[in-house]
Image (cartoon, coloured by chain):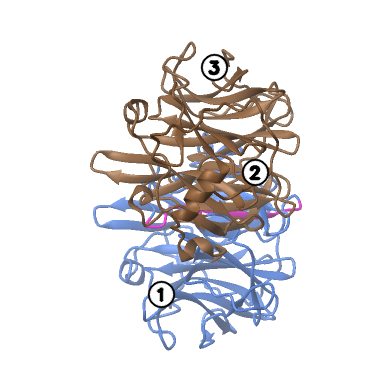
Chain colours: A blue, B brown
Amino acid sequence: MSNVKIIADNLPNIPWQDKPENCVGPVWRYSENPIIGRNPLKGVARIFNSAVVPYQGEFIGVFRGEQTNGIPYLYLGHSKDAIHWNYEPDKISFVNEKGEPYMPRYAYDPRLIKVEDTYYIIWCTDFYGAALGIAKTTDFKKFVRLENPFLPFNRNGVLFPRKINNNFALLSRPSDSGHTPFGDVFLSESPDMVYWGKHRHVMAKGSQWWQSLKIGGGAAPIETSEGWLLFYHGVTGTCNGYVYSMGACILDIDNPSIVKHRCDTFILTPEEWYEERGFVANVVFPCAALTDAKTGRIAIYYGAADSYVGLAFTTVDEIVDYIKANEGTSEDDRNYGVM
Amino acid sequence: MSNVKIIADNLPNIPWQDKPENCVGPVWRYSENPIIGRNPLKGVARIFNSAVVPYQGEFIGVFRGEQTNGIPYLYLGHSKDAIHWNYEPDKISFVNEKGEPYMPRYAYDPRLIKVEDTYYIIWCTDFYGAALGIAKTTDFKKFVRLENPFLPFNRNGVLFPRKINNNFALLSRPSDSGHTPFGDVFLSESPDMVYWGKHRHVMAKGSQWWQSLKIGGGAAPIETSEGWLLFYHGVTGTCNGYVYSMGACILDIDNPSIVKHRCDTFILTPEEWYEERGFVANVVFPCAALTDAKTGRIAIYYGAADSYVGLAFTTVDEIVDYIKANEGTSEDDRNYGVM
């Protein structure tokens, strides 16, 4: 085993189970999955593809809640153990920088990432087509929408948890406005969260069949002594639809458009009933991870079948060893991504 | 007739012909069209969708030259009358900001726009998919590529000829990497030509059938006392392919994501042999315009059938009167374009 360091805070109350002896892969599921079931709150049929952060000794979640009218929106939840949740009944209210109401038409697949003293929510919003929306909060009471970072069409915006070379850094996946049968991950920078540029190609869909259709960022990259550990989703197409698996890679710490290691295999793929069955069958979609630097423990939150939230575990040593033992990095992944 | 002022320099040597008596529309073709025919220079089969500016008392053009291997590139041309051209034999050599060679894989549909003392070329480039490339020059000898402004997929980047509210302003058309059977025009701002943001929706494809599939910016907006006069292309789909016509609108001078007037009808549509026949039949594609503030004369350069360059004329009074007399602006056009 290597001895990789997570460069982040300790989190002694991270949810955790040890690896079962019969587990074949580098990531194992929580035994009580799914942690969020159907009809979790009034008017919301399903919660999935959602994000969790530690906050004031407990946990806060920003959840994709599919309202019973079919329109997805963002909901706030509180938890002491990051497993059992109390939801606020109303969807999150966004305001503009003047404090005036500024609600998106819909909002889905949120990521929730702390940079310095501010929490940023990035979601897929309607900007004359699917695009990224961003809002900030410091208290989880007032949520201020910022400028949409990019033109449409885009999805899967994932912010790095600190500035790199003095700029905010954001992964995203240029898309179309439909089910997007293509897609690579790009990196963009911003000095101020208003203007974005220095776009770089990070990595393309893979030659491996499990990620042969498209890929997209998942949890916020985890800073480690080996580079940025990124959990992402990879998608394959079948005669009966898409299958979403979880992949992992390590990006260069100073130039994260350079992929240092990319795992040839998925690290989790739909197998359990709550991943194979649901509104969209066969989806494992990571959106967030908690880490404990002291123990190297990682808890990954993933949407399951667009119907549930699942929790899975690994350690930084285990996953980094596994990625390196299953090296699938291409020439194109390794380069700087300019054209 | 109104008395609209063009807010720009005089250009006494603008190419010009008076309106023929039998002309039914607001725009009339040059009698000697096409001004650039087939095989204009060695290794280039066709020139079309190209841009012209006045330079040192004469004219410079940046041309889309389709090489005989089928790959489009940019070529430079010089002219005394803006009609007859001498081409430099080699494609334009781009360097990066360190002066090192930095050639795009392909380059097409250039716009060439002077802002302050610098000329900017914006073209469609390969950035892991169709995207906008930008380069600057002050002497038409050294061409320095800047950061690509946007993530893919994008086309039809059209810069405003001056900063607005202290920022560069760029129209573009989010696209796909193929023939793009959709497309609206957006506006983006940049303080520095590196980072872009404050994206706004300007206008969508129209309810009018001639622009019912997609639209895209054409010539650099012309500053007038009525607002920014924009010539653009509008596309319809038929059983035998797309048909590209020329449209016109007037954008608010300080907030150009607001459309003040948008012409219900096309102002030029394929009728002549060089517009109806060619590599891509039925294309009229404006990319540049010259203006003479003193007389109000406007000369529009347009690609014809992806095979030729055509020249057409109007006056600022004639076209603004026509647009206002054929008002087709929608509610959505008139709003600020935030979401």
Mark 2, residues whose alpha carbon is within 10 Å: few (<14), some, or many (≥20)? many
Q: Give the image location of residue A295, x and y in percent.
A: 65, 66
Q: Amino acid at mark 1?
A: Ile
Query: Which residue was labeled with disc 3?
Result: B84
Q: Are the residues under badges 1 and 2 in a single subunit? A: no
**Foreground pick, A158 / B73:** B73
The magenta segment: A166-179
Mark 3, residues whose alpha carbon is within 10 Å: few (<14), some, or many (≥20)? few
Q: Is residue B258 above or below residue B1?
A: below
- On residue A71, which mark appears? 1
**A177 is within the stretch colored magenta:** yes
- Where disc 3 sits, the SS reads loop
Q: Is residue B58 above or below residue B134?
A: above
**Foreground pick, A186 / B288:** B288
Q: Amino acid at mark 2?
A: Ile
Q: Give the image location of residue A262, x and y in percent.
A: 52, 46
Between marks 3 and 1 in the image, the one whose residue lies nearer the viewer: 3
Query: Which residue was labeled with disc 2?
Result: B6
